[in-house]
Amino acid sequence: MRVSLLLVCSLFCLFTLKTEAQTNSSPSSWIRVNQLGYLPHSTKAAVFGSKNEQQIASFSLHDANTHKQVLKSKKVKSYGAYTAFTATYRLDFSDFNQSGTYYLKANGATSPKFTIGTQVYDHTADFILRYMRQQRCGFNPFLKDSCHTRDGFMVFHPDPKLDSTFIDATGGWHDASDYLQYVTTSANATFQLLFAYQQNPTAFKDEYLANGLKGKNGVPDILDEAKWGLDWLLKMYPQADLMFNQIADDRDHAGYRLPNKDVVDYGKGPGKGRPVYVVSDKPQGSFKYKNRSTGVASTAGKFASAFGLGAQVLAQHFPDYARLLQTKAQQAYAFGLARPGVSQTAPGRAPYFYEEDSWVDDMELAAVQLHNVTGNPELLLKAAEFGRREAITPWMGKDTARHYQWYPFINVGHFYLGASNNPAIKQEFIQHLRRGLEAVQARGKDNAFQMGVPFIWCSNNLVAGLATQAMLYRQLTGDARFAQMEASLRDWLFGTNPWGTSMVIGLPENGVYPKEPHSSLTVLHKYKLDGGLVDGPVYGSIFRNLKGIQLVNQDEFAALQSDLVVYHDDYGDYSTNEPTMDGTASLSYLLSALQMEGQNNTKQTRKSKRKERKEPLQ
């Protein structure tokens, strides 16, 4: 859960100045760009922001090696004040498509260097798998050691005599920088990895073994990681009528420590096992606070969709395993049908939990995956029936939401129905995808960053989900009406935001990205969490009201904070700077699809050049 590992300690820490915001030639004005880079034929825009009133009529693009001006443009649009800026402008250089390394200049401000090229996103989806491997529970290849090998003992079993009985639940991923584990997020992350491979199979390498150590095993690394998730999900669903929802609770938040040194006592002795919560259709919680569970379908649907897609994607490599997954998918779907409603995560001593209120989207995705596995046409109709009950993912177009209230943040079931062979269903669900995008686009049209996503906890996960929906819609329809929003969401994650920072640790290598994430691995040993997507900015009102937050270092982004929204690269801020496992996994499709678009652009360019050589000039 996204809460502090402890009430923040006062630890001495050397403060390192690390942003271009303090070395910019104009300390009150900045140009924000996607530091990772731009594909040649994609929408390309930067944002100029100033603490002072500014009038900009044009900007220039310069070769970073020769410093020669290669473009002078008047494609400038003023948006006025936003966040900490008094004046903002959007600078559009989409028409420029020559590969190279460049920077922008406007009114004395200079942007960071960036690349235009077909390879700027190559293997970035593989890169984020580094963080997934670092999050592994059981054998952890990053630490080369095992953790939580005594998980766990059942709690809230319908038969009280079986409570505290041991069950093997070792494996999976730690949810964030704490060591709790949830089916809610893990099943979604597993699905996202499988989906990325299904859609873009040639984007992924084979450089790691199934255990996460270096080596080749004939299986793409993203499938190794997805199977790690599936193996744990199978343990969390041992019988057709027995399903588990989470491991541990917020007793975990007992201080900074490495996972293989975790000795939190859950009543069995220090480090001697953690509680494994049986999924419940009634309010649940081990102490004072309870969730608001009403059914099991939200969890059962996530199990079924991950198992169903796994059965399809892994059949080539693991045929017997795939058949098992199909059986478990059918069992989980039936379990969800019988007990509709949401099964929320269980709080501990604090009132925080994942407040998921939706379940029809989970059952929609489960039904469509089972349709794809079995070919049963009734399942397609059932998926559409569920989908109509939540035509638009409810957070879209809203200003705020409770924590994980509408999760997952993208309804991939709508995409599958929009790609179906049923013409009526196809058009209906393409329209639903469009309406959701329109709702967020309307919220963001009046600011230079085109940001319509609400700044709730884990806002970056919403950004990744919406960017994915925009890309899937464009690929389904060929309709480019959301291309600018799609590009803005993509660019926001890599530096085109008020703070000028990438939100993915280590991307790009020489850029500005989180150096002090909220994590024991960073705090205790300065380990680098390559590939992790941090939570992202939150409303100032959220930040001011959360418990246990205390910045440890001087805020290098102080001049860029506002009452509206804040982001801190500081391990004391668990609300904006904690990497999350499910958010990271949700980038796998987006980044692999961008890689494939770059490769396809290269092929088209080569084809065009060959054609030019063969055909005489007219």
Image (cartoon, rainbow, N blue to C red):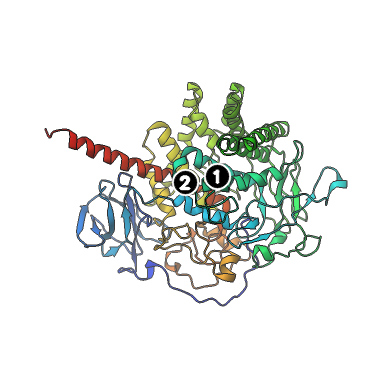
How far apart are the alpha carbons under marks 2 and 1?
9 Å
Q: What amino acid type should be assigned to the residue bearing mark 2? A: Phe
Q: Up-down: is 536 above or below 254? A: above
User: What is the x, y in percent for residue 105?
Assistant: 26, 60
Q: Indicate the quadrant where residue 546 lies.
A: bottom right
User: What is the x, y in percent for residue 86?
Assistant: 36, 60
Q: Up-down: is 611 above or below 167? A: above
User: Label 1: few (<14), some or many (≥20) within 10 Å?
Assistant: many
In this rendering, the count of numbered labels is: 2
- Identify the residue position indicated by label 2 in the image: 204
Which residue is at the front of the view, 415 or 90? 415
The residue sitting at 35% across, 50% down in the picture is 119
Kindly give the residue lying farthest to the left in the view shown: 618
Do the CB atoms of the residues marked 2 and 1 lie less than 8 Å apart? Answer: yes
Q: Secondary structure at mark 1?
A: helix
Give whichever of discs 2 and 1 has the lower sequence position.
2
Residue 40 relative to residue 535: left or right: left
Quick check: can you spot residue 311? yes
User: Label 2: few (<14), some or many (≥20) within 10 Å?
Assistant: many
Kindly give the residue lying farthest to the right in the view shown: 161
Q: What amino acid type should be assigned to the residue bearing mark 1? A: Leu
